């Protein structure tokens, strides 16, 4: 009789342990099961409204608020000042990002991120110069892909620089390839980002 009671409990424990092991140590598990889940829309933090007290021009880059969250990954960009990026919309509202990869990923699929804005309403985009910490217009910046420096997600990212010379000097010391803005394609961003949904 005792044996009949503990055998079902043992079976439940074995199944639970297997489920935990499968979750924590997926091994060569296919991502097909994850891809089957609909990830068409992400609910994100709202854009930060402009602060009239700042006296900044409407489309000027602004300091990242401590409470701002990246609309792509949910991290706090203020904690990663060498990587931070921002998009300012026509009404002055701003989305802050923890890295250039997430900024570009957002722009490649704004509608997927449940934003009230469209990509056409993005009036200005800025990335942080990795060396100086200054804001640089994203479309005039140069990026280094594949360096030994890890981004905020502790994986490959795009270090941004205000000049090609700075980017090339960084690439010589830390490895990687220098890219102009036009070379940062949606395909490249999908390959670099674990946060963007697969289609």
Image (cartoon, helix red, strand yellow):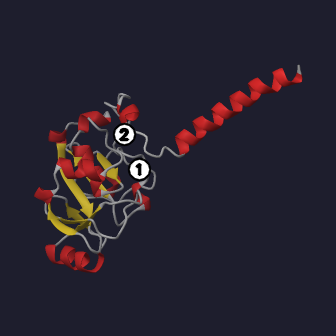
The residue identified by callout 1 is 68
Image point 24% across, 38% down: which residue?
110
Quadrant housing residue 24? top right
Percent position of residue 146, x then y? 27, 65
Using the image, determine if residue 164 lies above or below residue 53: below
Q: Confirm whether residue 121 shows in the render.
A: yes
- Work out which residue is located at the far left of the displayed protein and give it: 182
The N terminus sits in image quarter: top right
Q: Residues within 10 Å of mark 1 (few under 14, many from 20)?
A: many
Q: In which quarter of the image is residue 138?
A: bottom left
SS label for mark 1: loop
Residue 131 spot, x, y in % from top left:
29, 75
User: Badge 2 is on which residue?
Assistant: 46
* 119 relative to 180, above or below: above
Quick one: which residue is furthest to the right in this view? 1
As helix, strand or loop, the secondary structure at mark 2 comes to loop
Q: Is residue 59 visible?
A: no
Residue 37 appears left or right of 25: left
Q: Which of 13 and 98 is in front in this view?
A: 13
Q: Is residue 81 above or below residue 14?
A: below
Foreground of the two, 57 or 2: 2
Q: Quadrant of the C terminus?
A: top left
Q: Residue at x 31, y 30 (%)?
A: 40
User: Could you tell me residue 194's position as x and y percent?
Assistant: 35, 48
Q: What residue is drawn where x is 83% and y is 22%? A: 5
Q: 10 Å neighbourhood of mark 2: few (<14), some, or many (≥20)?
A: some
User: Sequence-wise, which precedes: disc 1 or disc 2?
Assistant: 2
* Disc 1 to disc 2, C-alpha distance: 9 Å
């Amino acid at each position: 009789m005792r044996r009949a009671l503990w055998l079902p409990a043992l079976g439940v424990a074995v199944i639970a342990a297997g489920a935990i092991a499968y979750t924590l140590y997926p091994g060569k598990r296919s991502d097909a099961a994850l891809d089957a889940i609909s990830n068409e829309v992400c609910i994100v933090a709202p854009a930060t409204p402009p602060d009239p007290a700042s006296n900044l021009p409407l489309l000027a880059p602004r300091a990242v608020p401590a409470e701002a969250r990246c609309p792509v990954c949910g991290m706090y960009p203020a904690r990663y000042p060498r990587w931070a990026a921002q998009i300012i919309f026509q009404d002055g509202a701003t989305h802050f990002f923890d890295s250039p990869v997430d900024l570009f990923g957002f722009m490649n699929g704004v509608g997927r991120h449940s934003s009230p804005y469209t990509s056409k309403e993005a009036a200005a985009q800025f990335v942080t110069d990795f060396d100086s910490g200054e804001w640089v217009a994203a479309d005039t910046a140069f990026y280094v892909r594949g360096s030994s420096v890890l981004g905020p997600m502790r994986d490959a990212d795009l270090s941004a620089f205000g000049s090609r010379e700075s980017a090339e000097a960084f690439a010589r010391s830390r490895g990687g390839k220098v890219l102009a803005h036009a070379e940062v394609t949606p395909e490249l961003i999908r390959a670099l980002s674990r946060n963007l949904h697969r289609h």
